[in-house]
Image (tube, rainbow, N blue to C red):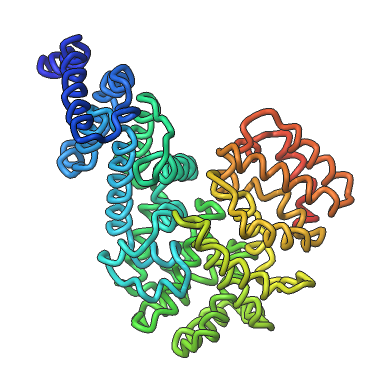
Amino acid sequence: MANQDNSSDLIERPRYDLQLEQFETRLLSLLAHCELPTESIFVSIGERINVFKNLDSVVTKLNDEQKQSSIYISKFIAAAASGLFDAALNYLWDQTILELRRCAAQYDLSFFYDNAVSPEKRKDLKDESDLVKLTDSELIYGAREIGLISEVGFKHLDYIRYMRNWVSAAHPNQNEITGLQLISWLETCIKEVTSLPLSSVAVGTKQLLRNIKNESITSDDAKQIATSFVNLTQDQVNSLASGLFGIYTRPETSPQTRQNIHQLLPLLWDRVDESTRQQFGIKYGKFVVNSDKDEKELARQFLQIVLAESYIPDDLRATEIKIALDNLLSAHREFNNFYNEPPFARQLQSLVGEAGKIPEQVYKPYVLGIVEVFLTNGNGVAFYVEPIYKKLLDLFDQKQALIAICSFMETNIASRLQFTLCQKKFQELLDMMKSKVSAPAIQALIAKLQNFTGPLDKMKDDATIKRQLAILQKILA
């Protein structure tokens, strides 16, 4: 304890400030000698002190084992001490990604992959070594889907990912990061990822998946297991069903495991929402399009268990639209999206056509996808494709417009609304959708959203807005 006090005294001692000043002076002299820039290199010493004043209370959230494996936190501290906050943020994100990969590997990797990526990419992911093939956005989206991180944790990490992409040393910029911002981001990543224990639901799901793969589940066992389904949220039900679909349709899955799913699926199916059910039909269509004969047959068997073959698309155009939409969103969520989005946007526009007729199976994901790309990544507008997005939005019918208006209730969209540019684009979206709906209740909701004075990412939690949405449930159904 005495050593900890001495360390704290050392950080706050004026001599420590002097040492940093001397370090800066010598290094700046070297840069000047090499005729390199010397302006705006280091964050002020005062901002660095703000980091170290709060460092102990944050790092103590790590246990001894976690500390030993946190090499990038050491680099984070070294970069912060040097006044290179942009580099420190980069190191912090590196540590967070490593921890997310570790959590996924220790949970159930197959289940994670099934929920994190598209079926096309899923085929190339086998074991822990393939985690590096996932983009950062796929990693945190997948972690949220299976409950490794909370919805609040996802929102915070999505914000830090945005800052890492556009404010850190990962990208040329002249933005400033304060010491309090930096230390708060470190605390968020430790609290929401590194030191966050698995929830009781996640632990239960992990054990269930292990039993499905390794034990024989009888009809009585299945009924007993099904009693735990009532404790799952809608998102958790959908994720579990998607995981079961992924396990069932892999050719290497054992007959016993498929029989176990056969026992459990009918007891879960009633709680699976309509949108997720339609996605199983779309996945069947993708197997057809990609000539995956074994997976196609197994997907049909999965749907037959619950008499759900009606979800198989009548028109494989629905599958093609979903594939194009997945490709567009994957490009949009990553670093070089301004350059990578246009070909996928044009492909999607071609599939949608001038009439804008969208198959029922992809109705909601299509609308939410177009809203997400229109809102931008928060850093800038992709000018080459924005006319395409506006054209697609203009083709929305009243039902699609209503889904777009209520999109702020979706976690992905709410997370985007943390950023100023996305907030501005959402207001623009509401103006565009206003002329497409006539019901007074919908017009009243739009007025409420446009006049909302709090943070837009909090709208979905507002009691008045929730009541207004309840009135619209029959229209949305």
Q: Quadrant of the N terminus?
A: top left
Left or right placement of residue 128 versus residue 141 in this view: left
- Which residue occupies the foreground of this view, 80 or 71? 80
Q: Residue at x 34, y 82 (%)?
A: 252
Position in image of residue 185 (x %, y %): 37, 34
Determine which quarter of the picture holds residue 214: bottom left
Report whether residue 405 is seen.
yes
- Which residue occupies the foreground of this view, 362 or 244? 362
Q: Residue at x 82, y 58 (%)?
A: 398
User: In the displayed structure, would residue 411 be above or below residue 392?
Assistant: above
Position in image of residue 61 (x %, y %): 27, 32
Q: Quadrant of the C terminus?
A: bottom right
Left or right placement of residue 108 versus residue 56 in this view: right
Position in image of residue 90 (x %, y %): 32, 42
In the displayed orientation, state which residue is furthest to the top. 14
Position in image of residue 113 (x %, y %): 39, 65
In the displayed orientation, state which residue is furthest to the left. 3
Determine which quarter of the picture holds residue 25: top left
Q: Residue at x 45, y 70 (%)?
A: 244
